[in-house]
Image: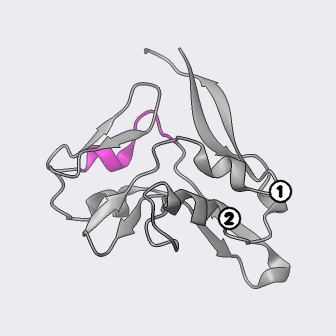
């Protein structure tokens, strides 16, 4: 099955403008970046570049495996769905993600999960991120 997912196309192009982060947060109609599912961090100052952290839409997501209430459920083709009504805010999912791509809503005490919508892609002026197709097995 061919699926689409958000991916980092060229991290070296990132200038740390945070446009993708702000765009993601705007999905919820909010300003700022507190509710973004993407993070951009400086490696060691502007001259060293930036790290862009986005959900890799794992086909066997560790965040869903450790969820004690099944609030996170693996999607066919990769990534997860979050049912916030089932989430108890234990944070196991955040700790389980090997790349730190489970962001956290401190006010709601729940994870912020990338839904792979690609809304952020159009706001990246340097084509750092994009939607790519991938072949997944067993779907």
Label 2 or label 1, whichever comes before in sequence order = 2
Instruction: Please give the name of the residue rendered at 53% of the width and 21% of the height, measured from the top-left corner.
Output: 136
Displayed quadrant of residue 112: bottom left
Q: Which mark is residue 23?
A: none
Name the chief secondary structure element in magenta: loop
Left or right: 85 in relation to 16: left
Instruction: Please give the name of the residue rendered at 54% of the width and 45% of the height, measured from the top-left corner.
Output: 56
- From what the image shows, is residue 15 above or below residue 27? below
Is 126 magenta? The answer is no
Left or right: 137 in relation to 128: left
Is 65 magenta? The answer is yes
Residue 81 percent location from the top left of the image: 33, 40
- Marks 2 and 1 sit apart, C-alpha to C-alpha, by 10 Å
Q: What is the magenta range?
A: 57-66
- According to the picture, the residue beneath numbered tag 2 turns out to be 19
Q: Circle 1 — which element?
A: loop
**Looking at the rendering, in which quadrant would you find the C terminus?**
top left
Left or right: 135 in relation to 112: right
- From what the image shows, is residue 135 above or below residue 28? above
Residue 49 percent location from the top left of the image: 79, 73
- According to the picture, the residue beneath numbered tag 1 turns out to be 126
Residue 2 percent location from the top left of the image: 58, 18
Q: Residues within 10 Å of mark 1 (few under 14, many from 20)?
A: some
Mark yes or no: residue 99 visible.
no
């Amino acid at each position: 099955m061919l699926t689409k997912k958000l991916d980092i196309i060229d991290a070296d192009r990132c200038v740390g403008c945070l446009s993708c982060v702000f765009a993601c947060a705007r999905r919820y109609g909010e300003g700022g970046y507190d509710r973004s599912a993407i993070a951009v961090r400086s490696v060691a100052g502007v001259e060293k570049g930036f790290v862009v952290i986005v959900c890799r839409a794992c086909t066997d997501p560790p965040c869903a495996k450790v969820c004690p209430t099944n609030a996170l459920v693996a999607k066919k083709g990769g990534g997860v769905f979050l049912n916030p009504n089932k989430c108890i805010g234990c944070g196991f999912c955040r700790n389980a993600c090997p790349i730190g791509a489970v962001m956290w809503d401190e006010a709601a005490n729940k994870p912020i999960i990338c839904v792979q919508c690609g809304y952020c892609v159009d706001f990246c002026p340097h084509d750092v991120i994009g939607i790519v197709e991938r072949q997944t097995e067993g779907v």
